[in-house]
Image (spheres, grey):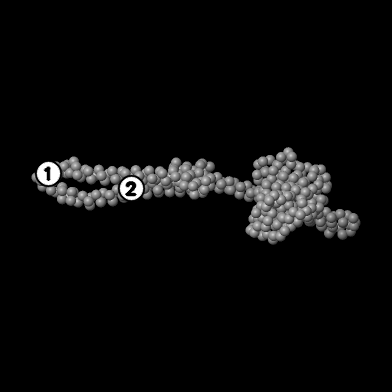
């Protein structure tokens, strides 16, 4: 059904109700006019003549003459005035009905901003608008809840990061102070302290970068520098870079991508997408398991999947996994859990490439699926 037909069906009940009311008023007005006209010509005239004769003690003929000169000869003007009064009556009540509907709509709009969970109710003939207002109310309430939850997660994360920053910073200060106060430390011990201090400094840098990531996420646009990239080469290189992260737990990553598969897009941004997904798969997969990376072309679309064996993601978490500041396990420290921005940023980048990203999880494994255009699309 076209949008025009849907709009017509939505307004049909309202239009019919208004037409019924208008038709009833017009018929009533016409009936009153004809009734008044017949009264003037019939028994009403006799009553007026009798009243004049008895009240003012006039002869019947004199009273009849006064009646005829006053009413009969001015009948057209009287009828014209009567019609004008009837039209004013119809117009007045019509405007009253319309303004009544406007008042209902205004009250419904006010209810959109009301924190009450009660549904908006309008007249039966306004049911189409009542449905739309309630849909808007539900959407606004959901957005408000999501915003509050996102803000709460962000605030919690900032608290976690601020707490975690103190630990490496205290270690850095402590070891540097120790080496400063004991300049004659053995070389081996000094080298050990320097190594620990450097590790803590790197950790501190990582946490500071997390802070910058949080503040930058909502402010940055995503400009794309598009070019054709060899997807197989990019993913193979990324897997090699993850070897030091995967190997301690016996994890591996395998790439199954045709060597001639070309993907148009921004290499740096897409590398960040794949990096974030692979990092997530590595963090939440079981030891001694393999992460399978596959890509293929279907018509004008390139499909890319990352499959890992790990704990099943609950459906309620699966729906929120691409939201910013969402972390699968809130109990994880920021050193392992991240800021909860990786998958949200991945979704932003994929969307900027006119693609889509989704996740599925079952006992067989968790699969992240990416669909991107196989041909370049200007933004």
Residue at x 26%, y 46% (from the top left corner): 33
Label located before the other in sequence (1 or 2): 1
Query: Does 94 sit left or right of 2 as displayed?
Result: left
> Residue at 67% across / 57% down in the picture?
376
Residue 338 in sight from this viewpoint:
no
Along the line of sight, the residue nearer the viewer: 46 or 165: 46
Q: Name the residue nearer the viewer: 377 or 293.
A: 377
Q: Nearer the viewer, residue 228 or 237?
A: 228
Q: Which residue has dot 1 on it?
A: 53
Residue, x 41% and y 44% (percent of image)?
Answer: 16
Spot occupied by residue 114 in the image (x, y as percentages of width and height): 51, 46
Q: Which residue is mark 2?
A: 90
* Residue projecting furthest to the front: 299
Name the front one of labels 1 and 2.
Answer: 2
How far is disc 1 from disc 2 in space, using C-alphas? 37 Å
Compared across the picture, whether 132 is left or right of 57 comes to: right
Q: Is residue 138 visible?
A: yes
| Other-residue count near label 2 (Cα within 10 Å), few / some / many at <14 / 14–19 / ≥20 | many
Q: Residue at x 69, y 49 (%)?
A: 298
Q: Position of residue 295 (x, y in %)?
A: 74, 50
Q: Quadrant of the C terminus?
A: bottom right
């Amino acid at each position: 059904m076209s949008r025009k037909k849907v709009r017509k069906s939505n307004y049909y009940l309202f239009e019919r109700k208004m037409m019924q009311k208008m038709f009833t008023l017009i018929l009533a007005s016409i009936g009153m006019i004809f009734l008044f006209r017949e009264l003037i010509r019939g028994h009403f005239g006799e009553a007026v003549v009798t009243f004049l004769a008895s009240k003012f003690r006039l002869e019947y003929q004199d009273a009849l003459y006064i009646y005829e000169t006053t009413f009969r000869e001015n009948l057209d003007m009287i009828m014209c005035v009567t019609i004008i009064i009837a039209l004013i009556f119809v117009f007045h009540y019509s405007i009253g009905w319309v303004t009544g509907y406007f008042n209902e709509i205004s009250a419904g709009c006010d209810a959109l901003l009301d924190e009450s969970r009660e549904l908006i109710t309008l007249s039966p003939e306004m049911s189409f608008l009542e449905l739309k207002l309630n849909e808007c109310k539900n959407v606004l309430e959901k957005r408000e809840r999501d915003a509050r939850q996102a803000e709460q997660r962000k605030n919690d994360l900032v608290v976690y990061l601020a707490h975690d920053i103190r630990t490496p910073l205290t270690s850095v200060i402590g070891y540097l102070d120790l080496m400063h106060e004991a300049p004659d430390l053995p070389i081996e011990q000094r080298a050990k302290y320097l190594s620990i201090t450097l590790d803590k400094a790197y950790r501190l840098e990582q946490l500071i970068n997390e802070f910058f990531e949080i503040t930058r996420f909502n402010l940055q646009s995503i400009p794309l520098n598009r070019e054709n990239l060899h997807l197989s080469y990019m993913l193979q290189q990324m897997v090699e870079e993850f070897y030091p992260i995967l190997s301690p737990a016996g994890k591996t990553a395998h790439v199954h991508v045709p060597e001639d598969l070309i993907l148009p897009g921004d290499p740096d941004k897409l590398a960040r997408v794949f990096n974030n997904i692979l990092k997530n798969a590595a963090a939440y997969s079981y030891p001694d398991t393999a992460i399978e990376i596959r890509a293929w072309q279907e018509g004008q679309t390139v499909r890319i999947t990352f499959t890992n064996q790990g704990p099943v993601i609950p459906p309620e978490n699966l729906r929120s996994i691409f939201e910013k500041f969402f972390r699968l396990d809130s109990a994880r420290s920021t050193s392992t859990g991240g800021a909860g921005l990786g998958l949200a940023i991945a979704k932003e980048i994929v969307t900027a490439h006119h693609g889509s990203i989704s996740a599925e999880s079952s006992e067989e494994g968790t699969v992240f699926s990416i669909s991107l255009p196989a041909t370049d699309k200007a933004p």
